[in-house]
Image (cartoon, grey):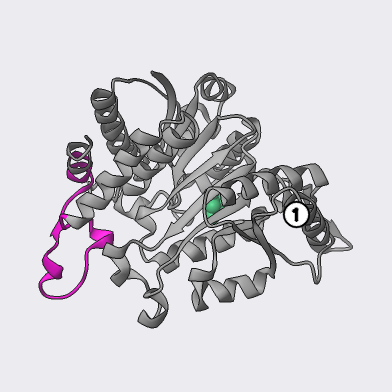
Amino acid sequence: MELKITCIPGDGIGPEIVAEAKKVLNRVAEVYGHKMLFTDILMGGASIDVHGVPLTDEAIATAKAADAVLMGSIGGDTTTSPWYKLPPNLRPEAGLLAIRKALNLFANLRPAVLYDELAGACPLKEEISAAGFDMMIMRELTGGLYFGERKTVEENGVRKAIDTLTYDENEIRRIAIKGFDIAMKRRKKVTSVDKANVLDSSRLWRKVVEEVAENYPEVTLEHMLVDNCAMQLVKDPAQFDVILTENMFGDILSDEASMVTGSIGMLASASLNDSKFGLYEPSHGSAPDIAGKDIANPIATVLSASMMLRYSFDLDKEADAIDAAVKQVLKDGYRTGDIMPSGSDNMGCEKVGCSRMGDLLAERIQ
Ligand code: IPM
Ligand code: MG
């Protein structure tokens, strides 16, 4: 099979981790007889430096022409990078928001899994982490506060800023359907998270989610207020299967969930539209402080490539092979710095750099 993939190396550690994901994908191609056709585009700071804008129309067109997009990370140090002296619509993050909108990537999937081998990195008490957890955060990605009307005005000498939170029922329904579809392939439980005790948009969210649930009698639906959910994520993360929520809540809860795993360098994500097309990226950021040092953890990007094979290309066997290679490399005791156990003997683990980790993963694809 021919796989047309647009890559966005981006900023910070992005180029390093994307290079390792390509290495692993090329190995998959070799073993399983596929052809990977990669085209790189610029986005974020890398695009600002060349074109003066974080995303060009040509770059969007290239992304659209592919079957899927694989991204590293974008953005820099917000206090020191010159990119953050630019107006907000020209900063690196605006490129990411623009590509999400342009490609209609309304469904963001962020798995948060506690790996057995890394259970020691989980910051929760052992009596909680011992239960393990494996949840999928389904975040609505092209609506809500992020894309509502906003402005800053001055009224009678008083500065005032306005952001608006809008959802129509169609936007809610399509993400809810994706959430229930995914739940059907997992443990068949959806926790819909909202703030229905205060917000109208949440009350509509709840109603539409309940309507969608009628078509999924096998799935257990529960509603949870977002503040309670933030608490439950640290109190009893094992209770969650699919968490279904709007854009802003999903942004915050997915960072919390990833922190609870203790290994954000391991977490992948997918942003999907109505068809098979998707943009795949690690859940972590661009880590400018460690960029260019060959010490970043490429595993989240490699696992994003695995999600890409699974969701955009229906190559489940190949995706399984990548996931198995990640498990094996951990079992074999190789760790990048971020997941290296502390203690005098490092629990027998060997510390490796970004590029070597890519080699070790590629070797284990068969
Ligand atoms: C994320 C990021 C982005 C978001 C930023 C970089 C705009 O935090 O993907 O979660 O808020 O969506
Ligand atoms: Mg975020």
Choose between 161 and 137: the one closer to the eye. Answer: 137
Report if residue 356 lies within the magenta region. Answer: yes
Tell me where the magenta segment starts and ends, as one range.
Answer: 332-359
Q: In this picture, is 55 found above or below 359?
A: above
Question: In the figure, residue 91 lies in which quadrant?
Answer: top right
Residue 87: tell me if it is visible.
no
Q: Position of residue 116 (x, y in %)?
A: 30, 64
Q: Residue at x 50, y 24 (%)?
A: 67
Query: Looking at the rendering, in which quadrant would you find the C terminus?
Result: top left
Ligand 2 falls in quadrant: bottom right
Choose between 162 and 202: the one closer to the eye. Answer: 202
Choose between 26 and 20: the one closer to the eye. Answer: 26
Q: Residue at x 43, y 51 (%)?
A: 285
Disc 1 marks which residue? 209
Q: In this picture, is 290 found above or below 62?
A: below
**Kind of residue at disc 1:** Val
Q: Residue at x 29, y 72 (%)?
A: 120
Query: Looking at the rendering, in which quadrant would you find the N terminus?
Result: top left
Residue furthest right in the image? 156
Q: Position of residue 53 (x, y in %)?
A: 55, 32
Q: Residue at x 28, y 30 (%)?
A: 28
Q: Disc count in the image? A: 1
Q: Position of residue 290 (x, y in %)?
A: 30, 53
